[in-house]
Image (tube, helix red, strand yellow):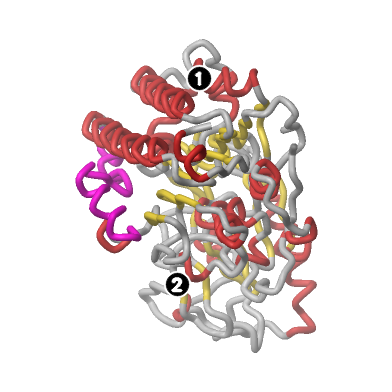
Amino acid sequence: MGLFDRIRGDDDPRVAFFGIDGVPYSLIAEHDEEFEHLHALATEGAGGAIDSIVPPESSACWPSLTTGVNPGETGVYGFQDREVGSAETYVPMGRDVQATRLWDRVQSAGRDATVLNVPVTFPPQRDVQRMVSGFLSPGVEEAAYPDELRDTLEELEYRIDVNAKLGHDDDKSDFLADAHETLEKRFEAFKHYIEADDWDLFFGVFMTTDRVNHFLFKHYEEDGEYKEEFLEFYRTVDQYLGELRELLDDDVTMMVASDHGFTTLDYEVHLNEWLEQEGWLTFDTDDPEELADLDESTKAYSLIPGRFYINLEEREANGGVPEEDYEDIRADLKAKLQALEGPDGNPVADRVVTKEDAFRGDHDDIAPDLVVIPNHGFDLKAGFKGSESVFGTGPRNGMHSFDNASLLIEDDDATVSGADLYDVAPTILSLMDVEYDRTDFDGSSLV
């Protein structure tokens, strides 16, 4: 029990959660000696691979992880969502998350939450102890609340994200240097507020792991040029997590989790190009750029990652598919997607999921009709500007996976086997002795 606890006379259990965006559990398990601190957390408590969500994209995953419910409840399905009955699309932000966040439940219970760098939290909430928004925030000045937090982060030269454009260069030296600097500043900020010891829930996310994986994961899996640099970056992540664990008092349970897994990317799959070639999608302009450019004769279109929408009358702005044809057309599209093969002869789809099977809730009116969960190696793209071919390559060589996300809990009574992302929020509340209705979540406590 820390000094702050002794002063306030509060012995309620606390939790420190550290997100490691996109880290596959296999990476941790295969390097138990090199990543000694993560290994110790898993062996002294519980650790293992868990499933992500449909679709396994960070903008959808973090709202689900922090609310314990599926996108049908959060209302967030990806980096780009569409307006109901409109050809307009938007980038979901914190205000678009319709379900109750974990830290709001903590604050409502009379406890305090410090929330740092969680994706899809901009603008920062004013009803938590402190918050700096994460990925897609414009900068620390606008992303931090209260002013004391902003001032401290600026003094630490805190950075919200790495410069991902540097990863496009063949020479990854500048990218790696930028990644290490961003990681270091994140660690310094986390350390500062861990040591403040004035919170009941500390919730911070390292996003740079996802960035490094996107540009270096193939080097790691296939013994490429930058494999050692990749491992050195993760040794640093492990060291930082070990130092943060040492700072935690006995009344604090540490948790570490990723929002999805990762694997090597072999092919980018341009799905709107495929739909156009197969006669499913047409445009009313020679230079299409957005959803509004679809022609009424379009039967389906795609948004990343692997989300497919039937161009249904009345529901879609340029909808031309009658309601009575919906089920037949969707079934036909599902069959064709299941049969789609890559240049290597392997199927692109591990499975194709209908919206009824994947989503449920009060905000499922913009749910995709089908979602493709790809096999490892096939990164699903969309866009309306056209591509030279259906299958291609780009600057990234790593991609998200539905399986093999990570979860580690400093509690030897925890059971991680068979868990998924929806279990994280109720587990944290259980560890903190914060009451909740079990029907509020799609998951359940692991302790």
Residue type at tag 1: His
Answer above or below: position of 247 versus 261.
Answer: above
Residue type at tag 2: Tyr
Say whether residue 201 is left or right of residue 138. right
Q: Which residues are magenta?
A: 144-170
Q: Nearer the viewer, residue 129 or 22?
A: 129
Q: Residue at x 30, y 33 (%)?
A: 184
Picture disc at residue 269: none
Q: Nearer the viewer, residue 372 or 122?
A: 122
Answer above or below: position of 120 versus 96.
Answer: above
Q: Residue at x 60, y 84 (%)?
A: 319
Residue farthest to the top, as pictured: 33
Q: In the rendered structure, which disc, 1 or 2, sits on the residue that comes first in sequence?
A: 1
Residue annotated with mark 2: 90
> Where the C terminus falls, by quadrant?
top right
Picture disc at residue 37: 1
Camera-near label (1 vs 2) is 1
Q: Position of residue 182 (x, y in %)?
A: 29, 38
